[in-house]
């Protein structure tokens, strides 16, 4: 018995068979896919090789050169959308001009922006020395979050990926899933800060971490992107960690909101057209720009500067600035001066000489042991939870040090830069009471100074003995009747 197919049914079966046999490549997250040479958005695919953008249809599919691709982001992944319009160099030009007008500290903003647009090329830098982490600190409302949101707009999003409740593990997971798109963490919390040093090392050189075992084999968590972070305060870090950062420390408001253009949603969305233009540069062109930038960086550095890793970091950021200049057909006025300005503020902070603070503490210890600085007048000593702290009057401290080191004086600004990287300096300027007066003091942990410990133990023992004798004298005197009878 033969079944008979209607004409329409036959063609429906053929069509279904063709659909099943058709190969469709699915993308579940945005970002760079090296194998296909694509940069994926939630609504488009940028073919890097062909330097062409393809927007998806209503079924979220794209056909390129006869092959079909489907964009179906996982529910837990951030969305990044490419604005549906042709790129105009005025878009990026306006951005560069507006940042210089609306941010007084334009040098810092330009360097952070330059680093941000280089993140699609993060792998080539991680393989050739590392890719720095952007760390932006400062008080609330100084402009940190606004700058991070601007970078998010450039990558086609209007949200920040992580907030203060994020963990180091969640950051690391996102750094693996978002390839070539910066992970933006705003106001990271204390829990992450404690593990931040290890995370920085891993992100800088893309060190994978084993996260489990499946079928007898280790499963690794890879780093495929760059990290940009804001926080209210700079955490305590060693020099080897600080040299893996590009940082800005904003103590006051840094944005003129009346001039800033990108609170306008439409203008902010158009910024997403910048990254496809950046992707038109080949890896060899980017590396060539980097080599030139590395050579130019030497002109901005002080002669005493020693740290090659920091030169490398700045060369990446400067390459990004130059890429933005090229796509904008615009040259930033006095760019060399702006870069030099940044180095003037941060070179001392980045070029760490760990011996400097040690020499200063040696000097302070000698002055205390010689009684040239007097307890209760020039400093106080505090013991708490096994820590011995010296609180020395800030003005007296600098006057004494500089008077005896005429040829190697240190300014308060330089001291503060170095102090940020040394765990022995607890606070560089806080108000305490010395000699019954409120005084600005420098707080230093001297728990590892055996001579000082012995000196204060002997001092405390002497005080205790003197107090005991005074108490004995007081008791003896209390027994004597000093009443004198006056004759009538």
Image: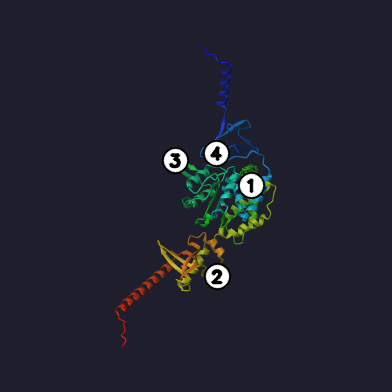
The residues tagged by marks 3 and 1 sit, at their Cα atoms, a distance apart of 38 Å
Residue pointed to by mark 3: 213
198 sits to left or right of 470: right
Residue 102 or 78: which is nearer the viewer? 102
Q: Are marks 3 and 1 in contact (CB under 8 Å)?
A: no
Q: Are marks 1 and 4 in contact (CB under 8 Å)?
A: no
Q: Is label 2 or label 1 in front?
A: 2
Earlier in the chain: of badge 3 and badge 1, it is: 3
User: 10 Å neighbourhood of mark 3: few (<14), some, or many (≥20)?
Assistant: few
Residue pointed to by mark 4: 29
Earlier in the chain: of badge 2 and badge 4, it is: 4
Residue 169 or 238: which is nearer the viewer? 169
The residues tagged by marks 2 and 3 sit, at their Cα atoms, a distance apart of 59 Å
**Residue furthest to the bottom:** 488
User: 10 Å neighbourhood of mark 1: few (<14), some, or many (≥20)?
Assistant: many
Residue 329 or 142: which is nearer the viewer? 142
Residue 277 spot, x, y in % from top left: 65, 43
Residue pointed to by mark 2: 402
Earlier in the chain: of badge 2 and badge 3, it is: 3
Q: Is label 2 or label 3 in front?
A: 2
Q: Quadrant of the C terminus?
A: bottom left
Residue 287 spot, x, y in % from top left: 63, 48
Q: Is label 3 or label 4 in front?
A: 4
Q: Are marks 2 and 3 in contact (CB under 8 Å)?
A: no
Earlier in the chain: of badge 2 and badge 1, it is: 1
Q: Secondary structure at mark 2?
A: helix
Residue 220 spot, x, y in % from top left: 48, 42
The residues tagged by marks 2 and 1 sit, at their Cα atoms, a distance apart of 47 Å
Earlier in the chain: of badge 3 and badge 4, it is: 4
């Amino acid at each position: 018995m033969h079944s008979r197919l209607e004409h329409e049914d036959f063609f429906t079966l053929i069509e279904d068979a063709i659909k099943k046999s058709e190969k469709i490549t699915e993308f579940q997250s945005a970002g760079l896919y090296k194998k296909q040479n694509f940069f994926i958005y939630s609504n488009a695919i940028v073919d890097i090789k062909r330097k062409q953008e393809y927007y998806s249809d209503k079924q979220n599919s794209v056909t390129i050169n006869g092959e079909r691709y489907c964009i179906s982001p996982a529910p837990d992944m951030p969305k990044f959308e490419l604005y549906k319009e042709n790129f105009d160099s005025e878009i990026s030009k306006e951005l560069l001009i507006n940042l210089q007008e609306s941010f007084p500290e334009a040098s810092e903003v330009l360097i952070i922006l330059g680093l941000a647009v280089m993140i699609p090329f993060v792998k080539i830098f991680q393989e050739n020395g590392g890719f720095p982490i952007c760390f932006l600190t400062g008080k609330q409302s100084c402009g940190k979050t606004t700058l991070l949101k601007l970078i998010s707009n450039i990558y086609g999003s209007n949200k920040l990926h992580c907030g203060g409740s994020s963990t180091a593990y969640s950051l690391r997971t996102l750094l693996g899933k978002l390839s070539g798109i910066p992970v933006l963490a705003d106001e990271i919390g204390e829990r992450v800060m404690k593990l931040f040093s290890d995370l920085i090392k891993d992100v800088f050189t893309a060190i994978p971490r084993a996260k489990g075992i499946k079928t007898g084999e280790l499963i690794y968590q890879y780093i495929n992107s760059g990290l940009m972070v804001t926080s209210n305060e700079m955490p305590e870090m060693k020099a080897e960690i600080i040299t893996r950062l590009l940082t800005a420390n904003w103590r006051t408001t840094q944005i003129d909101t009346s001039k800033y253009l990108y609170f306008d949603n439409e203008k902010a969305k158009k910024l997403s057209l910048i990254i496809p233009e950046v992707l038109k540069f080949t890896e060899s062109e980017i590396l060539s720009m980097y080599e030139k930038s590395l050579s130019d960086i030497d002109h901005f550095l002080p002669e005493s500067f020693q740290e090659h890793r920091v030169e490398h970091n700045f060369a990446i950021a400067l390459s990004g600035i130059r890429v933005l200049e090229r796509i904008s057909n615009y040259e930033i006025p006095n760019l060399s001066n702006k870069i030099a300005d940044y180095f003037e503020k941060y070179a001392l902070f980045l070029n760490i000489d760990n011996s400097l603070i040690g020499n200063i503490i040696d000097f302070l210890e000698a002055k205390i042991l010689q009684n040239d600085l007097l307890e209760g007048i020039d400093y106080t000593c505090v013991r708490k939870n096994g820590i011995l702290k010296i609180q020395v009057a800030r003005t007296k401290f600098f006057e004494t040090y500089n008077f005896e080191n005429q040829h190697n004086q240190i300014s308060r600004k330089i001291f503060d830069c170095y102090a940020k990287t040394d765990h022995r300096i607890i606070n560089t300027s806080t108000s305490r009471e010395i000699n019954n007066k409120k005084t600005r003091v420098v707080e230093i942990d001297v728990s590892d100074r055996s001579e000082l410990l012995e000196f204060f133990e002997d001092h405390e023992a002497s005080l205790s003995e003197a107090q005991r004798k005074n108490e004995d004298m007081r008791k003896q005197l209390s027994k004597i009747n000093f009443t004198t009878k006056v004759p009538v």
